Amino acid sequence: MSGALLEVRGLSVHFGTFAALEDVSFDLHAGETMGLVGESGSGKSTLARAILRLVPALRGSVMWRGTNLLACDARELRRQRRDLQIVFQDPLASLDPRMTVGEILAEPLRIFESTLSAPARQARIGEMLERVGLAAGMRDRYPHEFSGGQCQRIGIARAMILRPKLLICDEPVSSLDVSIQGQIVNLLLDLQRDFDTAMLFISHNLAVVRHLSNRVLVMYLGRLVEVAARDVLFAAPRHPYTRALLAAVPDPTRAPAGAGLIAGEAIPSGGSLASGCVFRPRCAYAQAQCALAAPQLEKAGAGHEVACHRWRELVYS
């Protein structure tokens, strides 16, 4: 991989007194798929929206091919958006019910490729519909006439019709039937390969993340707690939270593991954040030092970073 396309540095987002994101930093390279995992409420969707400036950031920078998106004026941000696309979690809610599929796919072309003739635009729309597994003749139908999986294919077609450099997928298969999820994931992989698109894939489904990611970010309460190559993370997680997430995945070939790794039942609310390490109230390995200061990401190996005061001394069975 060449130099980073996307460089996020110290990104923080606060909603009132609640820190939804705090000092998040990572790089994403051309053609790479970065998985982003964590429980609901960990800040995954907020991170996606902050990168695209769909929610305001308190501080930090989002460098996209040398341009800080957080410092762009409206005209420059609009120009950059053709290379930055997103697929949302709810496929039907993300499509305008008053527009036909053809109109939905034509809109980005009218905005960013206004010199295209009407026949050329219709040809692109038909080609893209077929590319995502739908018939070109479906362009005159409305979103309510399609299944959830078909609506997600339309959302993907809308995002990819401009051949973006970065695609952010915010839980794109979580609302779909299990039988459809694999089809959508494989479609995304095919499109990424064909268009050489970098992808930030947000999911709580660790099996899906393992299938398609090159590297994985693990978030907890708005903080990155571990960053590693996919195979390294799944083989040797260093943070207790990552370990607990992986242990929670059912494995029919072995006895249940991970009991006692998490002390609480659910992720705490923003109004009850602990001092020091935010994972401390739920961590089975927490000690007094964990309450004194928030741990920072530090190297735990080649391309592997972990934010835990005790990661060197913890040995997992």
Image: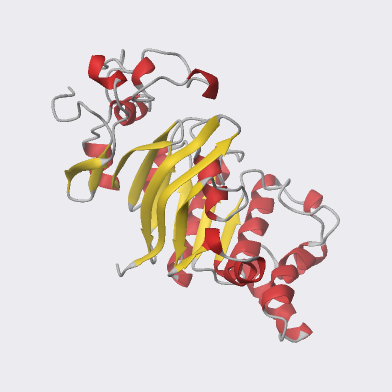
Q: Is residue 285 left or right of residue 5?
A: left
Q: Give me the residue at 30% from left, 70% from top.
A: 2
Q: Nearer the viewer, residue 93 or 279?
A: 279
Quarter where residue 299 is shown: top left
Judge whether residue 183 can be spotted in this image: no
Q: Nearer the viewer, residue 179 or 125?
A: 125
Quadrant for the N terminus in the image: bottom left
Quadrant for the C terminus in the image: top left
Judge whether residue 173 can be spotted in this image: yes
Q: How many marks?
A: 0
Q: Give me the residue at 28% from left, 35% from top.
A: 307
Q: Give me the residue at 52% from left, 30% from top.
A: 40
What x and y, as percent, mark residue 272?
A: 50, 18
**Coloration of the structure image:** secondary structure
Q: Nearer the viewer, residue 176 or 214?
A: 214
What x and y, as percent, mark residue 157?
A: 63, 63
Asked if 284 appears above or below 300 in the picture, the reply is above
What x and y, as percent, mark residue 244?
A: 33, 24
What x and y, as percent, mark residue 309?
A: 22, 28
Asked if 21 appears above or below 34 in the picture, the reply is above
Q: Give me the residue at 64% from left, 48% from top.
A: 149
